[in-house]
């Protein structure tokens, strides 16, 4: 598995246009340089220059025009996530403009209104950005309580009245997909507004940051049938279905930030001398770096494998509904740990004004909190636990998807309910193809977890206690995480020393999560006994650790630096 490095980046998509575009994006950032990126970030300058560049290269039009709405158009998840990783490598603001544009386009291309789809495709060509107006100040995650109103008028039109909060691109978006309710019927409704319309007030940027995360108000904004995207159950499903595939990009944003921070950190530490020794000679520094690298490797292996499942999703194969929230929740939280580990090494350097690291340190924490908090996603994940662990079924093999096909299913995901009916392929078939020492320990931990569930599983009170289930969910998530990491490792023939080291981290993390569960007040004695069995140590192998440290991690010294 290779980390993104702009110096030797060679995209391998089947078409020259995509490869040329992704290289041009990278070249634009490299030419902009670190000093300019940091200046804009410090001065909280919105990324107009990047939006202009994207227009000149038709970047968003290429990435986000689905088949049927432009020449050679295709919505290709692999291409999109690769772009997300590259954009975030240079800063979350660039990623966020793309991300909220995708969120804004989701309800349009999921919706029923052909006219708006064509309007959006035209605007994409013209270089527009988009926005997704779901959140409201008073309601947070409780989207059932949306108070934006669409008020029917006697001539069959509507007036939109209400406000939205935390809406990215709300300052500039050509179309803002807005979620609300019909004031008479109470039906949910998605409609579009233009941020430049006189009845649209962009009140303020709710955050003191480079991203524009708007509060906007609609003051009896006139809405016709041509502006309505979907109504009733369909509007609700389109909202959740949009988030289903957009939240996926959060993990790739995290990978981009962490990769850049890792290059900078190793360059700094490997070239700093204290007491006559390199900082990288401290044993704890080697461990922190190696753990951070292993976490990042796993983030990348899992997320890119999950992309295959998203691209192959269908009405009969909805496994992506487990893998996507894990990319969103787990990968972004792993990103936080990577930055924390690197920061422990580079210490004061992480606060300095000039390096990129400061951006990563500040922005990394936002990713688990966007598009549903980590808790909301974990509450989703635990719904799959029973079928995943105890009722596997056969599926056709999911290949590595590098083709250009349009991921049409994303716009036809259908009703969002029925999660408990989704089954998974047998994780044991993948784990059993490995006999590395730490994977063996991890397999025993999985068996211990199954034993806990079978013999002393959570009772009704514990199942209703979200705090308890979130803790249990951490253990379950790590099992699924390891599963797809190994699937991708098999496909890429990942170095077994590195894999064993990745599972060294997983074994310790599993033990840590078990300790958390052990401390929950409602446990019975039987549960505590079984949970204690989950706490295991990895198999020590200092030579292997040194090899991974030197060949994978220390070897990054001097490999990349963003010039001023
Ligand atoms: C920088 C930024 C950009 C954003 N961009 C957009 C955007 O473009 N468009 C948009 O519509 N929104 C956007 N948001 C809003 C974002 O999606 C919300 O912040 C998020 O949905 C959570 O809402 P909240 O922060 O108000 O938390 P709250 O809903 O107030 O949550 C409070 C606590 O309750 C917990 N909780 C809530 N529900 C559950 C549940 N069901 N189960 C368990 N625990 C629960 C949460 O985990 C949290 O700990 C953005 C937010 C930020 C900060």
Image: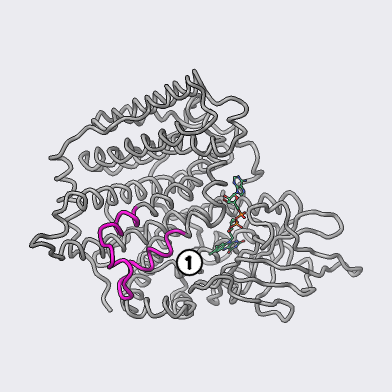
Residue drawn 49% across and 24% down? 453
199 sits left or right of 330 in the view: right
Q: Is mark 1 on a helix, strand or loop?
A: helix
Residue drawn 52% across and 73% down? 208
Tell whether position 44 is magenta: no
Kindly give the residue lying farthest to the left in the view shown.
276
Say if disc 1 is inside 8 Å of ligand 1.
Answer: no
Image quarter where ligand 1 lies: bottom right
Residue drawn 65% across and 40% down? 417
- Position in image of residue 184 (x %, y %): 87, 58
- The crowding category of the residue bearing disc 1, from other C-alpha atoms within 10 Å (few below 14, some 14 to 19, many at least 20), is many
Q: Nearer the viewer, residue 239 or 357?
A: 357
Its colouring scheme is: one colour
Q: In which quarter of the image is the C terminus?
A: bottom left
Magenta segment, which residues? Answer: 338-365
Q: Name the residue under label 1.
A: 62
């Amino acid at each position: 598995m290779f980390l993104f490095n702009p110096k030797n980046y060679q995209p391998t998509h089947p078409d020259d246009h995509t490869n040329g575009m992704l290289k041009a994006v990278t070249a634009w950032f490299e030419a902009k340089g670190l000093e300019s990126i940091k200046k804009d970030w410090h001065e909280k300058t919105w990324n107009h220059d990047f939006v202009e560049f994207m227009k000149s290269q038709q970047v968003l039009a290429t990435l986000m025009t689905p088949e049927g709405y432009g020449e050679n158009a295709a919505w290709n998840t692999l291409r999109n996530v690769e772009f997300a990783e590259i954009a975030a490598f240079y800063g979350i603001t660039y990623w966020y403009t793309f991300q909220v544009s995708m969120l804004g386009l989701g309800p349009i291309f999921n919706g029923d209104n052909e006219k708006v789809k064509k309007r959006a495709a035209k605007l994409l060509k013209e270089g527009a950005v988009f926005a997704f107006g779901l959140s409201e100040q008073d309601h947070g995650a409780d989207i059932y309580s949306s108070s934006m109103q669409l008020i029917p008028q006697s001539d069959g039109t509507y007036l939109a009245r209400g406000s939205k909060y935390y809406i990215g691109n709300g300052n500039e978006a050509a179309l803002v997909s807005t979620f609300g309710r019909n004031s008479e019927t109470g039906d949910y409704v998605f409609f579009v507004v233009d941020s430049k319309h006189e009845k649209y007030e962009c009140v303020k940027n709710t955050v003191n940051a480079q991203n524009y995360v708007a509060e906007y108000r609609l003051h009896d904004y006139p809405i016709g049938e041509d502006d309505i995207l979907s109504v009733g159950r369909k509007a609700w499903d389109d909202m959740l279905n949009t988030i289903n595939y957009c939240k996926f990009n959060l993990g790739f944003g995290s990978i981009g930030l962490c990769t850049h921070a890792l290059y900078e950190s190793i360059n700094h530490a490997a070239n700093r001398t204290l007491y006559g020794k390199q900082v990288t000679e401290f044993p704890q520094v080697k461990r922190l770096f190696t753990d951070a690298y292993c976490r990042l490797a796993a983030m990348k292996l899992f997320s890119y494998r999950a992309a295959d499942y998203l691209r192959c999703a269908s009405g009969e194969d909805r496994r992506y509904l487990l893998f996507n929230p894990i990319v969103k929740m787990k990968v972004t939280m792993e990103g936080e740990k990577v930055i924390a580990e690197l920061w422990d090494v580079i210490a004061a350097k992480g606060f300095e004004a000039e390096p990129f690291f400061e951006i990563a340190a500040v922005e990394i924490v936002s990713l688990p909190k966007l598009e549903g908090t980590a808790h909301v996603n974990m509450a989703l994940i635990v719904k799959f636990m029973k079928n995943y662990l105890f009722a596997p079924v056969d599926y056709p093999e999911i290949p590595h998807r590098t083709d250009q096909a349009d991921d049409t299913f994303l716009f036809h995901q259908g009703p969002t309910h029925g999660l408990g009916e989704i089954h998974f392929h047998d994780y044991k078939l993948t784990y059993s193809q490995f006999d590395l020492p730490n994977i063996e320990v991890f397999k025993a931990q999985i068996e211990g977890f199954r034993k806990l569930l079978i013999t002393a599983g959570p009772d009704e009170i514990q199942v209703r206690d979200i705090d308890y289930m979130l803790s249990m969910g951490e253990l379950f998530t790590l099992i699924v995480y390891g599963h797809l990491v190994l699937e991708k490792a098999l496909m890429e023939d990942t170095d077994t020393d590195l894999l064993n080291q990745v599972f060294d981290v997983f074994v310790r993390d599993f033990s840590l999560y078990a300790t958390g569960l052990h401390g929950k007040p409602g446990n019975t004695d039987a549960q505590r006994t079984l949970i204690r069995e989950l706490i295991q140590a990895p198999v020590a192998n200092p030579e292997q650790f040194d090899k991974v440290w030197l060949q994978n991690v220390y070897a990054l010294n001097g490999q990349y630096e963003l010039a001023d």
